[in-house]
Amino acid sequence: MNPRRVSKPIQIGKVTIGGEAPIVVQSMTKTDTRDVMSTITQIKELEDCGCQLVRVAVPDAESAEAIQAIKRGVSLPIVADIHFDYRLALMALEAGADGLRLNPGNISQPKKVSTIAQAAKERGIPIRIGVNAGSLPKTVSKLTTAEQMVEAALQQINLLESLDFDLIKVSLKAFDVPTTIEAYQNIAQKIPYPLHIGITESGTPRRGVIRSAVGIGTLLCQGIGDTIRVSLTAHPREEVFAAYEILKSLNLRQRGPILVSCPSCSRAEVDIITLAEEMEEKLSKVDKPIRVAVMGCVVNGPGEAKDADIGIACGKGSAVLFKKGKKIGIIQEKDFITALMAEVDKF
Ligand code: SF4
């Protein structure tokens, strides 16, 4: 792991992004923003699973105005996602948005950007320059997509800096993972601002989680990234879950349990796949950071089970139960789940 890149922190509502702040997990609602109650319900669900910052789409004036009522019902900071119409950004600011996302591919005219920057500066509201490979501005000239993305961001950054606006965060997202990595590596050396990282349109969870883990994980290992969003074609709680799993796998954040389970093989003396799935379901309702191991036999079982906070190494019809490396009993197969969960509850 490389040391984390030093970035200039910004504040979005109560959340700090960049500097030495922990890497922030964010997501985006998938409700109709004009449907205030549904949007509030979804934001609360996201907050319950650890989301720290939520973006809402603002495709029209009614959506921009709805931000005011949404903010009254939630405690997470709200970022307004703006495309095409700069007036929606002004309306979202008026409605109390804690942050803006602008796409330089569809709002780049200096006069419009300047009007937004002035209104944001008066309120101390940061702007994310959210470049997307699928909607690059016509003003970019470089050869590769990664270079074009960087150029698009730098053009907008230069414009904002010329307006004495520096509450900036940047993202450069593409579906192609190597392109995304190259773009972030490039811009990370050129600007001091915090980076929002992610792989855009990465698909349904089965593939999208992997594409995101490879892209986001690679960048995080290089010390690049101050906030992450996993974009999935799924309920946004899946995005938050995946984001934490990425951060947990690199020991960058802790949240909830870690389940260690062996893949199973012909040596397994119990149905370890079903057992691990049942444990995962049970542990999904647990908040505490605890490592639980479910191992199929005596080959790696005792070692992994001992390393975990709670673990079992299974034999035929029974298992050795370990707690903090010490053997604390033998349990029968029918009691595996209840015995493990009893220890988790006590932990
Ligand atoms: S722990 Fe045992 S059952 Fe599980 S994969 Fe390893 S050898 Fe197979």
Image: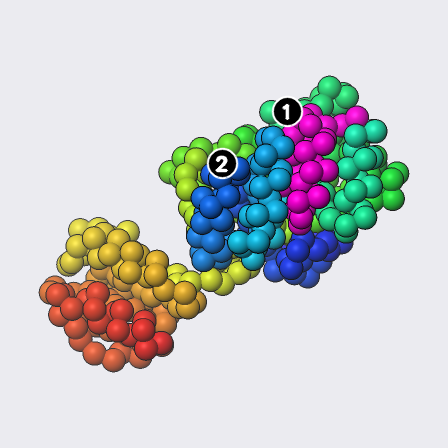
The image quarter in which residue 132 lies: top right
User: Which residue is drawn at the image coordinates 43% and 67% (left, top)?
Assistant: 289
User: For the residues carrying marks 1 and 2, which lies nearer the camera in this image?
Assistant: 2
Residue 228 lies within the magenta run:
no
The residue that label 2 is drawn on is 32
Q: Amino acid at mark 1?
A: Ser
* Residue 327 in sight in this render: yes
Q: Which residues are magenta?
A: 80-109
Q: Disc 2 on helix, strand or loop? A: loop
In this view, 24 is above or below 326: above
- Which class describes the residues within 10 Å of circle 2: few (<14), some (14-19), or many (20+)? some
Give the image location of residue 212, x and y in percent.
Answer: 50, 41
Give the image location of residue 126, x and y in percent.
Answer: 73, 47
The image quarter in which residue 23 lies: bottom right
> Residue 135 got which mark?
1
Q: Earlier in the sequence, mark 1 or mark 2?
A: 2
Q: Amino acid at mark 2?
A: Asp
- Name the residue nearer the viewer: 87 or 236: 87
- Name the residue nearer the viewer: 280 or 269: 280
